Amino acid sequence: MPIKFSKAEKVFTLTTKNTAYIFSIACDRYLVHQFYGKKNVRYTPYKPYTVSFSPYRKELGNTWSPDVFPQEYSFFGYGDYRTAALKLRGADGTGVTDFVYSSHRRFNGRMPVEGLPFAEADEHVQTLEVKMIDSVTGCELLLYYTVFYEEDVISRHMILKNKGQSPVKIEKCMSMTLDMQGCDYDLVTLYGGHCVARRYQRAPLHHGMQSICSRIGASSPQYNPFFALCGKKATEERGDVYGINLVYSGSFLDEIEVDQTDCTRIQTGLGEENFGYTLLPGEQFCSPEAILTYSSKGFGQMTRNLHNFTRNRILPQNSLKKPHPVVLNTWEACYFNIDEEKLIRFAEESAKTGFDMLVMDDGWFGKRNNDRAGLGDWQENPDKFKRGLKTFVDSVKEKGVSFGIWIEPEMVNPDSDLYRAHPEWCLRVPGREPLLAREQLVLDMSNPDVVEFLKNSFKKTFENVSIDYFKWDMNRHMCNVGSPALPPDRQDEVPFRYMKGVYALLKWFTEEYPDAIIETCSGGGGRYDLGMMRYGFQIWTSDNTNPYSRTWIQRSSLLAYPAATMSCHVSNPRDDLKALDFRYKVALGGMLGYELNILNMSEPIKAEMAREVKEYKSFEELIRLGDYYNLVSPFENDFSAYYYTDRNRKEFLFSLIEKKDTAPRSTKPLKIKEAKADKNYVDLLSGSRYTGKELRDGLILPLTGEGNTAILMHFSEEP
Ligand code: DGJ
């Protein structure tokens, strides 16, 4: 039983394959966090103690102050001075609540997260529901703990029910609190910007608040919602590491606070700056789902836990199980100059090269000849498609490739028929000019009429057109966020309602086009999160296709997200076979595609691309579904090395990538520790043979110092 409750001690124990999460009920009212970490180790139960000036209830004695003990979920205003998870403003106007344990139940399966994406759970997964009640507001709080035993993941979310007589306003909403003893940790976050998203940062925790958040209306390139806390000495293979993430794609808040008692509070959720929600009597609110994992074996195991979880529980299973198509995307080759005849020739060359799909990027619809017009008018441009979209797509397919198309449903250009007809359908604040970014405004996805309109226009345009893939883009940050469809006292609900509208439309796409796959994108990786991954089979990793930048962007993405989610394109090698080889080998960190004008490529380049695609297909499954082992990370070194391996450790895809400024020398032994000592292996790419012991002891490889160089090896176990 992954979830146990000791009636005598009033202790809940949640166990996964390697971890335990323990908390108890104290004084018949408080939920006290006891331990999260390695399973079957002795932990010291929390002992209450007094801290001067900390408030307490007389009947419980001064050792039980909400300010001191580790909580399972924290509330505003009742004596816990650390950052709160929930702030509710009820009829008394104070914001004070005091939720008290009431009951609990365990069940197989999980509680869905209404209107938001959440992890898939069958009846083998168990959930604990703990009910707490605040007597003054009359609100009921349900805390959910879903235990994914095999993946070593526990997920948490909450539902708040207003069972009182008056409306309550949720002013801050976090999906979970985790109060840990001690503060000797480093914090790892992924920060950045457009083209430089997910830069790795590791810094010691300090007393006080540390937080990362997005305010842009998307999970953002500025800060990814994922973060990790690790022991000071934690490495790839050793030490305690906690990984935390949120299944949500909008603005979020991650908080880490080290308090006066040297304890660390961790929270993730919607926050308060970009959030508010009024619950009328009888209504309920559901927070996004938070994901927790723990590894006692360093970052590598944390990463593999998160990869397994994302593959098993988040990604759409139908597309994960099949080889991902190798696409030729038109963006860097054509930009907005979509030309029907040219693209049919692209399709023809693609088929000859072995690409599976042609993806027609931006520029095919409305008056979209540049980024100043057309967004919102989702009908093909008749000047560009003289015989209509259907005939064009049929012609592409006749050449022997499948077909993908770019859309950006959430946006509108002021120069569009849609905006002229419905200026009130974009996010705006009365009396203020909506600000442009990339020449576009944001549609009010919190308004169901807008979502309905979009469904109908896509339905009409794609009627009888056989689309195999949608690239769903989103190319600006939000500001002046207001919805003309909501009253003034509901305006702070817009960011959350917006995301619900986006998810509703994404869900509609998956149902309306069940055989099509969706690649999501936000100026590259601006919405690289578990929410988007629930609908899209992969994400365009970054608009930066420079292979050197891609090396670290891909490595830091892999820290939290599996290779199956990473769309990696080879861009124009400029007739240089060596550059092509390097770009290809870098792109093999994730799912391969190409983004170049195939009509301009020389015969040797085309022949080499054809060879690459064939080779890639021989090990694509290893990348898509394999376990990832990082050997040398590009953050601290002048080269990087990693390998993917299958569950049975029969195959290994090994890669070494030199940075531009690598010093020529030999590497230290690069140990493929997962190889079996008693087996022999052949590198299928060179034909060289190795014993398992040699691979385990480590490969010592030459670093050329020339840049543009990578080594790829595909080891296969010999019978
Ligand atoms: C941003 C994306 O990241 C690019 O790949 C491309 O699709 C453009 N948008 C098109 O506008």
Image: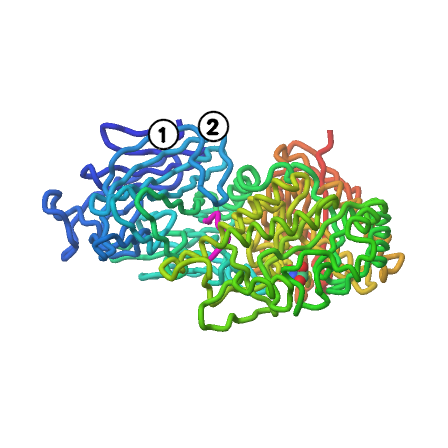
Residue sitting at x 74%, y 52%: 359
Q: Position of residue 92 (x, y in %)?
A: 21, 54
- What kind of colouring is applied to the model shown? rainbow
Residue sitting at x 57%, y 40%: 311
Q: Is mark 2 within 8 Å of ligand 1?
A: no
Report which residue position mark 1 lands on: 106
**Amino acid under label 2?**
His
The residue at the far right in this view is 603
**Amino acid under label 1?**
Arg
Report which residue position mark 2 lands on: 124
Q: Position of residue 252 (x, y in %)?
A: 44, 56
> How many numbered discs sit on the rendered protein?
2
Question: What is the distance, in whole Å, between disc 1 and disc 2 at their CAs?
Answer: 13 Å
Looking at the image, is 123 positioned above or below residue 675?
Answer: above
Residue sitting at x 48%, y 66%: 428
Task: Give, as a single range, the part of the protein colored magenta.
Answer: 245-251
Assign ligand 1 to one image quadrant: bottom right
Query: Is residue 261 found left or right of 158 in the rendered image?
Result: left
Helix, strand or loop at label 2? It is loop
Q: Which mark is residue 337?
A: none
